[in-house]
Amino acid sequence: MTRETYFSYAILGLQCKETEIVSLNDTASNVTSCHWVYWGTGLEYQLLAGPAFIVVVGLMRIPLTFVMEHGRINGRNILVGCAIAWSTATLLTGFATQVWHVYVCRVLLGLFQAPFSPFSVALVTAYSPPQLRGLAMSILNSGIAIGYALAYGLGFLKEAAGWRWAYWVAGSPGVIVAIIMLFTLQNPDKLIQKQTTQSLIKMGRCEQLIFQNWATIVPLILGSALRFGATYIFNYNINNYLLYYYPHFPVHNYLSWTPILSGFGGILFGGILSDVARRRYGVEGRMCIQIVLSVICAPVMTLIFFLEPPAVFAAAAVGTSIADAWTGGTVSTLTELIPPGLRPSFFAVYYCLINTVGGTLNITLPALRRAMHFRYAMIMAVIGLISLGTVLFTLGFFAMVCSRRRRRRYRGDENENENETEDENSNETITPTLN
């Protein structure tokens, strides 16, 4: 007769099985077998998840955006080609046999993903009026939440057919999406060229506006980088955290669908709330909403690390909803501070900074884990970055308020337009055409 007992030494990374064997003469003997469990919390994983991918995305966005804006290559064809190449790199990851193969594929994924965010922001901005821009940006960014949920959902495929199939299935739809883009996407460089020409007419005014708003723009960029770093650390480590403390709980049963509901709902809610605040109070209203959401977010996210399943998933759903709500509002605020023709170049620099700065902050987590428990390391990294980002957003808000009041006092104009950075064409929507 045998009886098996499972236990683990989480700190050591060991998972063991103890088997008690009872013979016919009622003598019992215990046999213990152990194997290493790789939690994915070390420096190698953080480098693979962070700098090997997201830093490449950030650094390549500036030159690729420059080529798409000023080069002779059709910008739409670049996007379609990058979508196909991205899918190919994902498929190739499934054939990796060495760790360095995975690193090379991650670098290629970052390279081919680079041009999408700056030009998607420029296109969505051109197609949507300022009053609905927060909602439009939120719908755009909701794809991130859906993507994370699908990644967790592929965990079932990994258990059933192996980890390689997860990459093969994830990379296949990109080719279909690229074909759809080829026939439906308006050529972005034509649209950007039109906006740039309009802005160059008043380039002196554009430079003046950027200089006047630098005290608001810089804290927003730095705060966004810290918030991005907090989100990146949470998303890439929450699965490992839950498996570390609750190894026998079916984590993927919850993480495969909660990010879609919480992330998608939070992003849309934040965008709608930002648009309502903008209509009533101007750009300052957008920023005020981001600050309030960040203040609420920190204590709710802290609860995640002190609750046990399944209550932890309820707290995670609420916390991530609030955390994701800032995305659309922040980008919409920046679009109203930057002249239309300069937005693609600006957002290339913006995403480069938040990716390279925020995307490397996850390598601090292994050092924190060596100094304290995993739980408190996550709190220090995630909640600390959210709090610092809130402070920077607040500084940017007060800088905007003080700057506008000072300009009004100097000009003696109490009815200054709150949306002064928008030219006469930026309030119009552009109807996309097939090219």
Image (cartoon, rainbow, N blue to C red):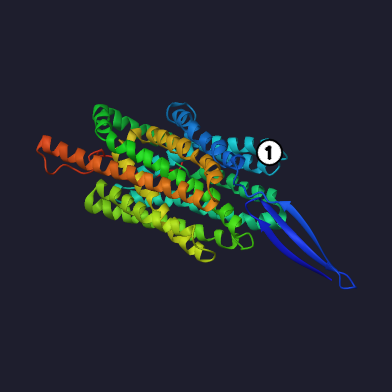
Residue occupying the point 28% across, 39% down: 425
Residue 33 in percent (x, y) is at 77, 56
Residue occupying the point 54% across, 55% down: 149
Q: Nearer the viewer, residue 277 or 296?
A: 296
104 sits to left or right of 77: right
Quadrant of residue 17 within the rendered picture: bottom right
8 sits to left or right of 176: right
Residue 247 in percent (x, y) is at 63, 59
245 sits to left or right of 356: right
Q: Where, quadrant-wise, is the N terminus in this rendering?
A: bottom right
Q: Amino acid at mark 1?
A: Val
Q: Nearer the viewer, residue 113 or 152?
A: 152
Residue 101 in percent (x, y) is at 68, 36
- Is disc 1 surrounded by few (<14), some (14 to 19) or many (20+) residues within 10 Å? few
- Look at the image and tell me whether residue 132 can be seen: no
Q: Nearer the viewer, residue 172 or 397?
A: 397
Residue 2 in percent (x, y) is at 82, 68
- Look at the image and tell me whether residue 155 can be seen: yes
Q: Total label count?
A: 1
The residue where tag 1 is placed is: 99
